[in-house]
Image (spheres, rainbow, N blue to C red):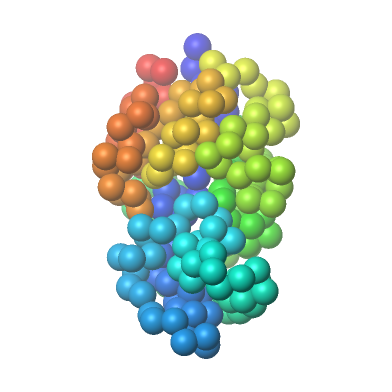
Amino acid sequence: MKPRLLICDLDGTLVDTSRDITNARNHALQFYGYPTLTVEKTVQVVGEGITRLIQKLIGDKAGTERQDEVKQRFLDFYEQHLTDFSTVYPSVTDTLEKIADLQKVVISNKRENLSIELLRRLDLLKYFVLVIGSDTTPERKPSPLPVLYAMKNIGTKPRETVIVGDSNYDIEAGKKAGICTIAVTYGYREKHYLNDADYRVDTFRDILDLLDII
């Protein structure tokens, strides 16, 4: 049975947002005297949402109040510079065009409003029937709840649903929900984090061949 629903991760799968996230993070951290970090360092720690990102960078000992201040400073800057440098990965748009008849959903650990706005600005929003962010459901990836929420809203069964993402969080969420998992190797995570995926592809276009055999 061919899939009826394709779930896509956002950052590191559809769009390279690493530089804009790095700039926002450094803007927030420098204000409080924390050292700046590179894009390469950023991609090693993103994926679990902004709250966990801040916790990882400044440490739990900084206290909730400081974490909230840094997070708000990050969000204020990021909202104003959401797509300064962010770009759609090669072959993403063409591939989405070719599977126009397949229902597609985005599940991101970025907040829902930011995910929607990012997709809108990069002219990708029109391809998706639903966008689920870190604050849409009570839990975010690697919890299966966002995946189950998507399937319930679209009306698909696990055997009819596929998730594609660049991180172990996407794969774990998909596995827990009982759906097929595809990992892209060009994103933010090193390949060894993707070993549990059912399939691995080197370009987004490669999922076209898989969708015919899954």
Q: Is residue 66 above or below residue 200?
A: below
Q: Quick check: 122 left or right of 202?
A: right
Residue nearer the viewer, 83 or 34: 34
Q: Is residue 52 above or below residue 169?
A: below
Q: Residue at x 50, y 45 (%)?
A: 9
Residue nearer the viewer, 54 or 175: 54
Pick the quarter of the image with the C terminus.
top left
Q: Is residue 4 above or below residue 73?
A: above
* Relative image position of residue 185 (x, y in whole percent): 30, 43
* Relative image position of residue 89 (x, y in whole percent): 38, 54
Q: Residue at x 39, y 44 (%)?
A: 166
* Relative image position of residue 119 (x, y in whole percent): 57, 57
Q: Is residue 161 visible?
A: no
Residue nearer the viewer, 145 or 97: 145
Residue nearer the viewer, 149 or 176: 176
Q: Residue at x 71, y 27 (%)?
A: 152
Picture quadrant of residue 61:
bottom right
The outermost residue toward the top is 1
Q: Is residue 66 visible?
A: yes
* Relative image position of residue 162 (x, y in whole percent): 50, 27
For the image, the number of numbered tags is 0
Q: Residue at x 37, y 29 (%)?
A: 197
